Image (cartoon, rainbow, N blue to C red):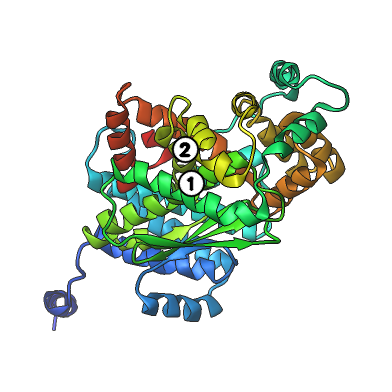
Amino acid sequence: MTLRSYMFVPLALAAASCATAPQRAPDSLDRIARDYLLLQLTIGEKEAGYIDAYYGDPSIAEKAVAEAEGQSLPMLEARTVALRVRAEQFADDGVEGTSIEERRARFLAAQLVAARTRLRMMRGQELSFVEEAKGLFGVDVELPPLESFDPVIAEVDALVPGDGPLWQRLESFYDKFNIPTDRLQPVMDAAIAECKRRTIEHFQLPEGNSFTLAFVADKPWSGYNYYQGGYASKIEINTDLPIRLNRAVDLGCHEGYPGHHAFNALLEKNLVADRGWVEFSVYPLFSPQSLIAEGSANYGIDLAFPDGEQLAFEMEVLAPLAGLPTDELATYARLREATRALGSARYTIVAGYLGGEIGADEAKRLLQKYQLVSPERAEQSLKFSDTYRSYIINYGLGRDMVQAGVEEAGPSQEARWQRMEQLLSEPTLPGDL
């Protein structure tokens, strides 16, 4: 047999082998989504609180438990990078107005950037506040100098004249509007009912959506929505500190309608149930999804109660229900509006604290000065930052970004509601705003 003949035999065998070998199906977003779901749940086994909600196939969660035992953090990071590369093949970055399938791919890729960032943090890598916020939530954060808030402080000071530190005068004034404990349930029930009434006039929420309400203590947050799936939520309100009158509407909108409960129900109905996009059955807390969730929940308050309607509702319904005076409610509302402008001062303070530039005592002092809160509320604020770190940017910056995205629809309230419902029903990223 010649050398040519020897060479021909293995080539022929290889050709025959290729002809009979099973062909792998081309990659797809559905396959990537299933791998994403398992990956996120596996990471969640490594860090308590990483997964905020999951209502998908229980067998996937069981598989994640088993996989986590044999997966190190570096292995999970490698899986995350590989999966992101696969997702990016279906995205057309930098093109506006692309198809919902391309937006789906970009959403998956962005969520995986956040997952990798969190895994790096879990491995002990130190990131600055700005780097962390960019990696986890997909936004650039500015840290304004604290002295830039001095004009706002002066404005608030003029509204609450008197002796003593400004935060103390403000707290004394606010304390007039603490809801008595025995009136808390009926006040919250009335506020949530009104938030829901206003929302369902505009949103097509799934039939049978519901929630339960519970009062809890010893938490780093003021309210929390635990989405259960099946269009149901468990809402908890923290009573460690007195709950003031405006917080009834704020929490009712933020945690309920048109906030977290409505958002999660719309995602489940429109993306999971109707489209079969399983990736939306899991919600990783430290991800761009949280900027949309918190930003829309905060902007939802203004959307549901525009142009002083919250003050009117508090004056006509909630204050009498709580047994509180109404004669100074207008000043109370002006103070709330003025102090909102101090929100981003918290980013600068927390960035310095988490970066080791200032200690806990100095951070609390600055929070009292620039957030105008009592020592107890400064302590709770810092406790939240210890737990959730740069997550705080989602409330203020997220609100501003969602507001800008919604109000592009024009001055019509109906157009804004429609735009809001669209944002909450599609794979929306901060860049889409």
Q: Quadrant of the N terminus?
A: bottom left
Residue 243 is left or right of residue 310, and the answer is: right
In the displayed orientation, state which residue is furthest to the bottom. Answer: 1
State which quadrant residue 216 falls in: bottom right
Please give the label number shown on residue 191: 1
Residue at 28% across / 60% down in the picture?
A: 272
Picture coordinates of residue 254, whole percent (x, y): 49, 46
Residue 262 is left or right of residue 376, and the answer is: left
Q: Quadrant of the C terminus?
A: top left
Residue at 31% across / 63% down in the picture?
A: 278
Residue 238 is left or right of residue 190, and the answer is: right
Query: Is residue 53 visible from the viewing direction of this image?
Result: yes
Going from N to C along the chain, the mark reached first, 2 or 1, is: 1
| Separation of marks 2 and 1 at Cα, in angstroms | 11 Å
State which quadrant residue 422 falls in: top left
* Relative depth, front residue between 352 and 365: 365
Q: Which residue is mark 2?
A: 301
Residue at 22% across / 41% down in the picture?
A: 99
Please give the label number shown on residue 274: none
Taking 217 as reference, is 341 above or below it? above
Query: Is residue 86 visible from the viewing direction of this image?
Result: no
The residue carrying pointer 2 sits among few (fewer than 14), some (14 to 19) or many (20 or more) residues within 10 Å by Cα, namely many
